[in-house]
Image (cartoon, grey):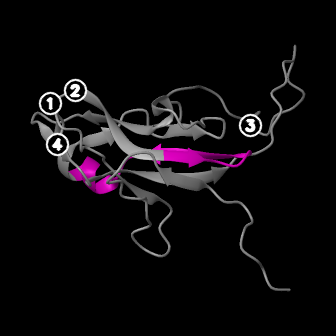
Amino acid sequence: MRKTKSEEVVEIKAFREGVIYPVKSTTNAAGYDVHAWCLDEWEKQILITANDTKLIKTGLNVNIPKGYEIQVRSRSGLAAKNAVVVLNSPGTVDCDFFGLMENFEVKVILHNHSKNGFVVKHGDRIAQFVICKLPDIELKVVEEFSSSSNEDREGGFGSTGV
């Protein structure tokens, strides 16, 4: 029996002019590269000073199907070469984050961990979107645990060594 492609689709549309849509850099990449949008008259580029954080516009709106999320992750090259990362990595865009107004534009929280300033220009690849299916899990409050597959584990942080 031949497998068919998933019926699920994440719709994406430009919220602003000059948007660069996310694309996969290689066929088997997990994430879609996300680009900065910096075309306001007063904002042709954005400086993230040393040890500072900025909210970077993408110019995008998304429509995510129920049961899915978009994880916003750091780009490894940006992190390794410039110490610039998505601060809350992975950030989550929930399926109910939807609307056509400005407060529903997808933005990326970038933090500069370096000692030097970092300039973000329009079109720079700043993050990646990884689309993930969410498990259907119930969170249940209990007085005692029924069982665990980890009963032989002891300790907490650092208990397994370096």
Marker disc for residue 52: 2
* Mark 1 crowd level (few <14, some 14–19, many ≥20, 10 Å Cα): some
Please name the residue that numbered disc 1 is placed on.
49
Q: CA distance from mark 4 to mark 2?
A: 19 Å
Magenta run includes residue 75: yes
Which residue is at a point 68% across and 33% down the rendered structure image? 153
Mark 1 near mark 2, Cβ–Cβ under 8 Å? yes
Task: Give the amino acid at mark 1.
Answer: Thr
Whether residue 141 is visible to the viewer of this picture, yes or no, is: yes
Callout 3 secondary element: loop
Q: Please identify the quarter of the rendering in which residue 102 is found.
A: top left
Q: Is residue 29 above or below residue 161?
A: below
Please tell me which of labels 3 and 4 falls first in the chain. 4
Task: Give the amino acid at mark 4.
Answer: Lys
In x, y percent, where is residue 115?
A: 11, 33
Task: Give the amino acid at mark 2.
Answer: Asp
Report the span colored magenta. 61-80
